[in-house]
Amino acid sequence: MYSYTDFDAAFVAERNRQFRAQVARRIDGSLTEDEFKPFRLMNGVYLQLHAYMLRVAIPYGTLRAEQMEMLAHLAETWDKGYGHFTTRQNIQYNWPTLGDIPEMLDALASVEMHAIQTSGNTIRNVTADHFAGAAADEIADPRPVAELIRQWSTDHPEFQALPRKFKVAVTGAQADRAVIRAHDIGLRLHEQNGDLGAEVIVGGGLGRTPMIGKTIADHVSLDDLPAYLEAVVSVWNLLGRRDNKYKARIKITVHEHGIDEIRARVEDRFALIRPTFTGAHMDLYEEIRAQFAPPGFRNAPTDAFDTAYAADPVFRAWADTNLSAHKAPGYAIAQISLKAHGATPGDASAEQMRVMARIARAYGHDELRISHEQNVVLPHVHKSDLPEIHAILKAHGLATANIGLISDIIACPGMDYCALATARSIPIAQQIATRFDELKLEHDVGDLKIKISGCINACGHHHVGHIGILGLDRAGVENYQVTLGGDHTETLALGDRTGPGFSAEEIVPAIERIVTAYLNHRENAEESFLQAYRRLGMEPFKQALYGDAAKRSQAA
Amino acid sequence: MPRAFTPKVITANALISGEVVYLTADDRWSPHLPQAELLTDEAHAQLRLVEANARQSEVVGVYLADMASTDHGPEPTHFREDFRRRGPSNYDHGKQAVL
């Protein structure tokens, strides 16, 4: 795993020193809020509904045990004992005081973490496939590229006042677990004639104007990639709409100018920039890559796993839902669900963070990942250790067997915390998970992703949920719109709106009617919700949701 | 006839703690909505807003929030202000822990 160089450590320390002084000047009255706000936003400090919020980057979602322990320490010392993992592989603290934040940042720096560029109109935390370096279907580990982009983009002088925020995601596998087509830039690493490079996708994004990213280049070799990315951001920096923040993202620029014109401009710009990258970037890349060498996998029998799998139905259920194929023989990728039925999606207590850190250290080659689906991943565990791991998880409320099921819900903080929200998300997620747990239906329902956003900005990825829920304010009342048929994978698709929204009281029964309609109409238990929706279309679900009222309004 | 003025209170977040606070008639910042000064006159409300905005070293994000006048003081007319005064609904902390 990547360790800070002296340069990195000095850079973060200097930024923390500056911010500490800026906070002091704000508190003593030397800086007004208007003067201070850009500084706090450069360092991940937001003012939310009830308090300040500190957003800490977890670059490409990767954590060492000691880093997770530090996150626990922050939660306990300066917050209310928990943290919230987000869809962009960050952790958010909801209750820090302004005066404590410099201490928190210094504590983070002691384990090589920071909150730089987690807000503001900059290139944000670079996200990656949470199975990076572990997945059986992987071609190249995306994290060295993500780290290279992080170093290139951090404090990049040309890109500190972009038209709007800019998000990059990287995957190196066949399956897309990083939603790359919903990012400003998505990179899919692949090899062409033995040359490692990336398919470059631009102009994706969710939010109020959801767009699926378009391929601007099929293959940019790694050597050319930093210059190519610089060309893309540079073209957008010039063309991007600064007159209207709702039209400022690159997805609108690509939409307005067309991908062919953007490609031509990028190629011109690339020709200009490329000679300035004289090879130091590749030396740096090789240094970074060496630090992401796979751990020393052990060769051992998996009998303990097979025995527990045969004997213990609780373990079996967990293994069936929460494990994924690993590239090393005898190993598995284990997901730790932060979606216990009725709990807040993505929240972990300090104690739970410590337990996960301990497991990673004892059984997981010291590695943890945060997924954009707000769960924690043990990327490298030997199968023979899984019964013990499961027992520890179970003792700490972390063994929920629901990855990919209806209660594995993405939910943004919504109006329980967020100043931008128009409705609550968390209680809806809690109620849906609780309801389907009561019905004991979720394993029968199978693969079904519900994603909830509490406003149009779509942090909860509702557009790409199999069932998406968008919370709005309709005449002073919370109202929830439903979309169906979204897909967050390599076959990315935006969901279709069902029709009028539902009140907070009506939304859970409405979701239940959708699920019942699916169960009634599916061809067999193997046909997933998404497959059934694609075959059947909206009609049976509309009928289930609105009954004859839908027909009446169509006739009218 | 001019449109009736919706009563308001001045609210903000405390500069250091970030806590939701309300401006009282005697110029204190209180965490409790019932103690807020209910502003029923538009001109007076604007004046109070200017005064509150000048208190940059105490609070951040000052604005006027719509309220209804009730027997137990100002009550939010919109759910956002209702959540702001109580705290989040998923944990028993924030304001609702003491209310």
Image (cartoon, helix red, strand yellow):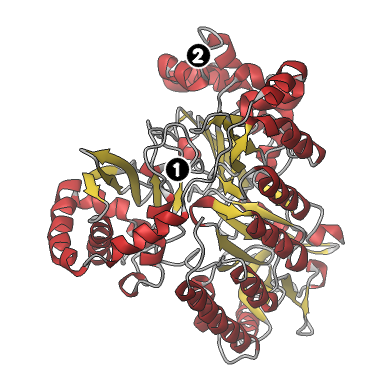
The structure residue drawn at horizontal position 52% and vertical position 74%, both measured from the top left corner, is: A9
Q: CA distance from mark 2 to mark 1?
A: 24 Å
Q: Can you tell which mark lies on residue A527?
A: 2
The residue nearer to you, when weighing A419 against A52, is A52
What kind of element bears circle 2? loop
Is A60 situated left or right of A369 in this image?
left
* Residue A483 x/y as whole percent: 49, 32
Q: Can you tell which mark lies on residue A63?
A: none
Tell me the residue that label 1 is attached to. A178
**Which one is earlier in the sequence, the residue at label 2 or at label 1?**
1
The residue nearer to you, when weighing A489 against A307, is A307
Residue type beneath disc 1: Ala
The residue nearer to you, when weighing A133 against A19, is A133
- Say which chain tag 2 marks: A
* Residue A8 x/y as whole percent: 47, 72
Is A98 situated left or right of B27 in this image?
left
Whether residue B70 is visible to the viewer of this picture, yes or no, is: yes
The structure residue drawn at horizontal position 28% and vertical position 67%, both measured from the top left corner, is: A280
Whether residue B68 is visible to the viewer of this picture, yes or no, is: no
Reply above or below: A445 against B56: above
Reply above or below: A222 against B62: above
Q: Quadrant of the C terminus of chain A?
A: top left
* Residue A374 x/y as whole percent: 59, 44
What kind of element bears circle 1? loop
- Say which chain tag 1 marks: A
* Residue A136 x/y as whole percent: 46, 32
Reply above or below: A92 against A209: below
Residue farthest top in this picture = A523
The reply to whether discs 2 and 1 touch (Cβ–Cβ < 8 Å) is no
The structure residue drawn at horizontal position 74% and vertical position 53%, both measured from the top left corner, is: A354
Is B15 situated left or right of A501 in this image?
right
